[in-house]
């Protein structure tokens, strides 16, 4: 049985149709597993699945009047899982909501509208490119460490051979 090793994106919105439409749009463009949540608390309790990206709505209280809002969920996610990228996507075009989202670590803030899905695709593409750049950077750091160690070993070996009377 083959296993799917694609990373996961959590879609968190209290409007199921919005979640489904966004999932359908993204699934055609990106190879991720998608999990849909209608409230932030359940998504937060599922973070042990280590999603690569969480897409959060700001208003998450259509089904639970006492539900936390997206910024509160964002803050909890970034506190416990700082490497998870979180994108806020909301109908709120209030500047303070966007500022709070960025202050608590959102990668981007996207206002729902006719270009929102396209912008979401571009944002996920940038996140993927950033991940590839980080991977390449880490690989190059390991290569440089290896080369430095190899050079030090060659130098030490050369010194030992010279001290023992060998001519290079």
Image (spheres, rainbow, N blue to C red):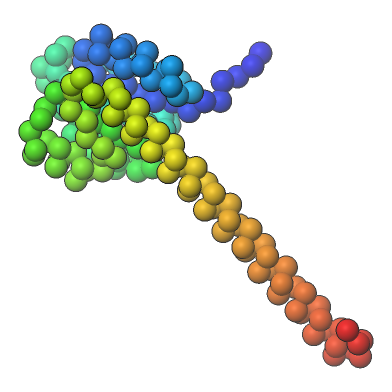
The residue closer to the viewer here, 99 or 69, is: 99
Residue 140 locus on image (x, y percent): 58, 56
Task: Quadrant for the C terminus, please.
Answer: bottom right
Q: Position of residue 6 (x, y in %)?
A: 52, 25
Where 30 falls versus 145 (above or below)?
A: above
- Is 146 left or right of 135, judged from the image as shown? right
Q: In this orientation, which residue lies closer to the viewer: 104 or 137?
A: 137
Q: Nearer the viewer, residue 61 or 165?
A: 165
> In the image, what residue occupies the spot 41% across and 30% down?
51
**Residue at left offset 42%, top offset 17%:** 27
Which residue is pictured at 36% across the width and 16% down the height? 25
Where does the image place residue 146, in percent across and percent down from the top left? 67, 62
As rendered, which of 22 and 83 lies closer to the eye?
Answer: 22
Answer with left or right where residue 38 lies relative to residue 35: left
Q: Quadrant of residue 163?
A: bottom right
Q: From the viewer's perspective, tell me whether residue 106 is left or right of residue 84.
A: left
Residue 57 in view, yes or no: no
Looking at the picture, does residue 168 appear above or below residue 55? below
Image coordinates for residue 74, horizontal then vertical, percent: 24, 35
Residue 109 in view of the camera:
yes
Residue reaching furthest to the top: 17
């Amino acid at each position: 049985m083959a296993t799917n090793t694609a990373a996961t994106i959590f879609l968190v919105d209290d409007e199921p149709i919005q979640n489904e439409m966004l999932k359908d749009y993204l699934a055609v463009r990106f190879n991720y597993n998608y999990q849909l949540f209608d409230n932030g608390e359940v998504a937060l309790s599922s973070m042990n699945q280590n999603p690569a990206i969480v897409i959060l709505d700001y208003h998450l209280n259509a089904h639970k009047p006492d539900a936390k809002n997206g910024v509160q969920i964002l803050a909890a996610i970034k506190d416990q899982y700082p490497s998870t990228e979180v994108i806020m996507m909301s109908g709120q075009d209030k500047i303070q909501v966007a500022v709070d989202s960025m202050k608590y670590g959102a990668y981007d803030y996207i206002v729902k509208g006719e270009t929102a899905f396209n912008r979401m695709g571009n944002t996920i593409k940038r996140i993927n490119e950033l991940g590839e750049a980080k991977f390449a950077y880490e690989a190059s750091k390991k290569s440089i460490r290896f080369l430095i160690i190899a050079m030090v070993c060659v130098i030490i070996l050369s010194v030992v051979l010279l001290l023992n009377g060998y001519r290079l």
